[in-house]
Amino acid sequence: MIHSKTVVAACAGILFSFGFNGFVTAAQTDSTKQSSPENLTGIVHFMDSSTKEVCTLAVPATTQVFDFSGNSHCENNKVAYFWFENVPSATLIHLYENAACSDAKTKGNYFIKLKTVKQPTTWSQTPERDKHISIDSLRDAKKGALLPGRYTRVEEDSWVGEDLEKENLNQRLSCVYIERSQPVN
C-alpha cells in the first residue's frame, strides 16, 4: 500500500511537471508572438535632408518621450522628413524643437501635433516621392487640417516661435512624444 502511494505521488509529480512545463512553453510562445513583426504597434520613420532614413521609433504600448539630445534614439537636429508605417488609429505624434517635449510657446521653440485617423495609418501607399513629409512643410498647419492622402490630422495649431519664423524647421527636431490610443473596455 505504501509502495502504491509512492507510485501515485511520483506519477502525479511527473504529470504536474509536464503540465507546468507545457504551460511555461505556451507562455513563452505567447510572449514571442507579441514581439513578432506582424504584431508591431507601428513605426515612425525619420530621414535626413537627403531623404536617407536615419532612425525609426516604434509606437509604444502606451506613451513615451523620445529625447534626441542624448542620441539614444535618433541624432539630435538631424531629422528633416518622416513617414508612418502601420501606426494605430488615434495615435498622437508630437514633434518638438526642444529636448523636453515642452508645449512652451517661447521664441526658440516649435511644436507640431498630429493624430492618425485610420487603422492602421501607413504612408507607403502613396508614391515613393510623396511617402514622406518635411517637418518645415507643417509649420503653418492648422487644427483639424488633414494631411492630404496620409490619414493624419493636425491636433492643434502648430507653434513656431519668432526666432524660428524665418528658419527652416528641418533638422531642428529634438524630441518626439508618442501616445498610442488605448482600447475601451
Image: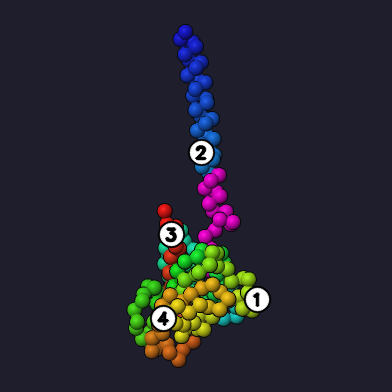
Residue 83: x percent and y percent? Answer: 56, 73
N-terminal of the two: label 3 or label 2? 2
Q: Which residue is mark 3?
A: 182
Q: Which residue is mark 1?
A: 127
Query: How many angstroms separate mark 4 from mark 3 (CA)?
Result: 24 Å
The amino acid type of the residue labelled 1 equals: Pro
Question: Which residue is at 53% across, 51% downward?
Answer: 34
Query: How many angstroms separate mark 1 from mark 2 (CA)?
Result: 46 Å
Q: Is residue 89 above or below residue 145?
A: above
Regarding residue 80, the answer to whether it shows in the image is no
Depth-wise, is mark 4 or mark 2 nearer the camera? 4
N-terminal of the two: label 1 or label 3? 1
N-terminal of the two: label 1 or label 4? 1
Query: How many angstroms separate mark 1 from mark 3 (CA)?
Result: 31 Å
Regarding residue 156, the answer to whether it shows in the image is yes
Q: Is residue 54 above or below residue 37?
A: below
Q: Locate residue 49 relative to residue 139 in the image: left or right.
A: right
Q: Which residue is mark 4?
A: 157
Q: Is residue 163 above or below residue 172?
A: below
Query: How many angstroms separate mark 3 from mark 2 (CA)?
Result: 28 Å
Depth-wise, is mark 3 or mark 2 nearer the camera? 3
- Assign a secondary structure to mark 4: strand
Number of other residues with Cα within 10 Å of mark 3, as a class: few under 14, some 14 to 19, many 20 or more: few
Query: How many angstroms separate mark 4 from mark 2 (CA)?
Result: 50 Å
The amino acid type of the residue labelled 4 equals: Asp
N-terminal of the two: label 4 or label 3? 4
Query: How many angstroms separate mark 1 from mark 4 (CA)?
Result: 27 Å
Q: From which residue to which does the magenta span run?
A: 29-44
- Assign a secondary structure to mark 3: loop
